Image (tube, rainbow, N blue to C red):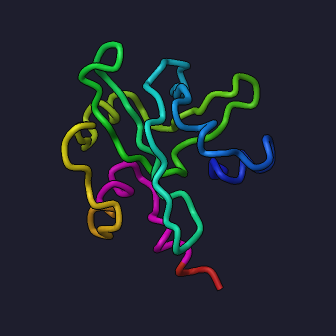
Amino acid sequence: MKKATEKSTAMYGVVPASKIIGETVVNRQSENVGKIHELVIDAGKNRVVYAVLSFGGFMGLGDKLFALPWEAFEFSATDKKLILNVDKDKLNAAPGFEKDEKWPNFSDILWGESIYNYYDYAPPWKTQALKP
């Protein structure tokens, strides 16, 4: 599976974050699973680390937020939607946080590893350390 950043560059060129934030996210079954609420960037390493997905609730009320590895997303070639490569049941049981409460410390490596492990992805700070 290609990373979302590789697909977006190949298919769309450079994509502004403002085009991704608020974008509808569907799963492989074309079910709406939410919208991108925020992107979390590791400015020191020049990479997107997480996409924060708003999921659940009704009409924006009661939505819960989930930090997902950026690699879990890909761009649809035809619909200009983001496709999340995570099962809806797994997302329903995922660790999340409330929009109006304290957000996780995204720079906490142990927290980050738990998120990446939950979704079965390798954290970029581990995979990139292996590259020459």
- The stretch drawn in magenta includes residue 126: yes
Left-right relation of 99 to 51: left
Residue 41: image x %, image y %?
A: 50, 59
Judging depth in this view, the residue of 83 and 9 nearest the camera is: 9
Give the farthest residue toward the bottom: 132
Horizontal arrangement in the rendering, residue 22 relative to residue 68 (left or right): right
Image spot of residue 62 (x, y percent) = 24, 23
In x, y percent, where is residue 10? 80, 48
Specify whether residue 87 is painted magenta: no
Determine whether, in the image, residue 18 is placed left or right of residue 10.
Answer: left
How many labels sit on residues? 0
Q: Which residues are magenta?
A: 114-128
Above or below residue 113? Residue 129 is: below
- Residue 88: x and y, percent? 38, 28
Above or below, 83 against 42 in this view is: above
For the C terminus, give its image quadrant: bottom right
The main secondary structure of the magenta stretch is: helix
Residue at the spot 52% in from the left edge and 30% down from the top edge? 22
Identify which residue is drawn at 47% across, 29% down.
Answer: 35
